[in-house]
Amino acid sequence: MYNKKSKKAEEFISHEEILETLEYAKENKNNRKLIDSILERAKDCKGISHREAAVLLECDLEDEKEKMFNLAMDIKEKFYGNRIVLFAPLYLSNFCINGCVYCPYHGKNHHITRKKLTQEEIKKEVIALQDLGHKRLALETGEDPVNNPIEYILESIKTIYSIKHKNGAIRRVNVNIAATTVENYRKLKEAGIGTYILFQETYNKESYEKLHPTGPKHDYAYHTEAMDRAMEAGIDDVGMGVLFGLNMYKYDLVGLLMHAEHLEATVGVGPHTISVPRIRPADDIDPKTFSNAISDEIFQKIVAIIRIAVPYTGMIISTRESKATREKVLHLGVSQISAGSQTSVGGYYHKEDHEHDNSSQFDVSDTRTVDQVINWLIELGYIPSFCTACYRSGRTGDRFMKLVKSAQIGNCCTPNALMTLDEYLQDYAEEDTKEKGLKLISKEAEKIENESVRNELKHHLEQIANGQRDLRF
């Protein structure tokens, strides 16, 4: 029985409700009156239901799709403006006891190089990341209670936050580790993590269990209910996503939106971020063996619909996607991207020779440097941002969401984005990027309507030029 307020996975992600929703969407795919009413109501930027989103996804009327895309762009502009937050993944260990058939870290893969970073190696990685200009990381590790216990994760977080190199510092550590206990989530909260991230992979229970035949991740309910335990433990911000291509995308998009509705209904705060990865080639993994791969056109539509359905959420696209694909979806809803990413264990300080020493989770499509990505974003008219001000000022969870949903977050985010961009330009940028970036900052600063904020921003920019760092609104 479907109940979005239930704490049981199979009730707030109801298989029957998803099937009924998909059938309803098929029946109404060309119902212009209904589609137009959904889009009209979505203009209030309060989101739409999973059933309404399914109708939009099913619709193949070209003029209605154009309306969807335009609305998604408008909503993105209202909530996130032209800011794009940058981050990098840091893989601590690829030891894993799960049997996930789509991931090269699975326990039966005996020819991938297994690695686990020591604390000294983590320091080298973090310094290398700081030298690239990064300020926020997403920690990644396989599930292995012997090699990757919670104590190792906590020690690693402490190490990362302790490293101050030149003008560099990691100011926010997001954590993507396996589903765990309330007690362990409390420990992560006490360690000062930013967002707890966990991808569902697929919401179809039958497919999920086949894709995860062995290991603790096989437990669908325990995995799906992880966000509830994390929030019970006091973690304010959670990030979710599915791996598109594992299962039928229509089913998984509906499940994803139902999960967001569940969090809103039970704790009053939906997902801080939603990621939209697609399956990629990797050691021991050929994406062609998965029959549910989605095209670029469908992918763009998914991004637009998520932005319409969950307007407040940050949307993340990684270097799994190419430059061309990332450029197509930035304006449709994406607000965070990774840059200069290495998906191997210890790939920043010393890059691997993948032919003889490969510990990567997947192949990277966008192989550009951080500076190249920033230069590209500036040319496209975006403000590359390394901002972590909300997290460090306590604007998390419901406090953050209230600001976002009221569209007031821009009063903080735009000046903070410009200041962190200025820090990057002063400390790390190539000359061409610095020249373009300073012109962008000058232009964007003048657009700030609040005179006191504009004047304070200009004062802070002068302070940054004189060597001060870590200023924020």
Image (cartoon, rainbow, N blue to C red):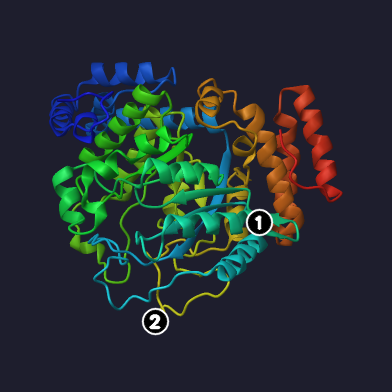
Above or below — where is 98 with respect to 232? below
Above or below — where is 217 with respect to 362? above
Q: Is residue 421 left or right of residue 155?
A: right
What residue sits right under mark 1 in the picture?
162
Q: Residue at x 50, y 30 (%)?
A: 397
Q: Residue at x 24, y 59 (%)?
A: 100
Q: Where residue 184 sits: x, y (%)?
A: 42, 46
Q: Where residue 411 sits: x, y (%)?
A: 65, 27
Q: Contact, CB < 8 Å: mark 2 with mark 1? A: no
Above or below — where is 309 with respect to 150? above
Q: Residue at x 19, y 55 (%)?
A: 211
Quarter-of-image position of residue 4: top left
Screen quadrant of the N terminus: top left
At label 1, the amino acid type is: Ser
Q: Is residue 25 visible?
A: yes
Q: Where residue 113 sits: x, y (%)?
A: 38, 76
Quarter-of-image position of residue 227: top left
Q: Earlier in the sequence, mark 2 or mark 1?
A: 1
What residue sits right under mark 2 in the picture?
355
At label 2, the amino acid type is: Glu
Q: Using a 10 Å C-alpha cutoff, classify the residue at mark 1 as few (fewer than 14 neighbours), some (14 to 19) or many (20 or more).
A: few
Q: Where residue 367 sits: x, y (%)?
A: 49, 65
Q: Is residue 242 left or right of residue 332?
A: left
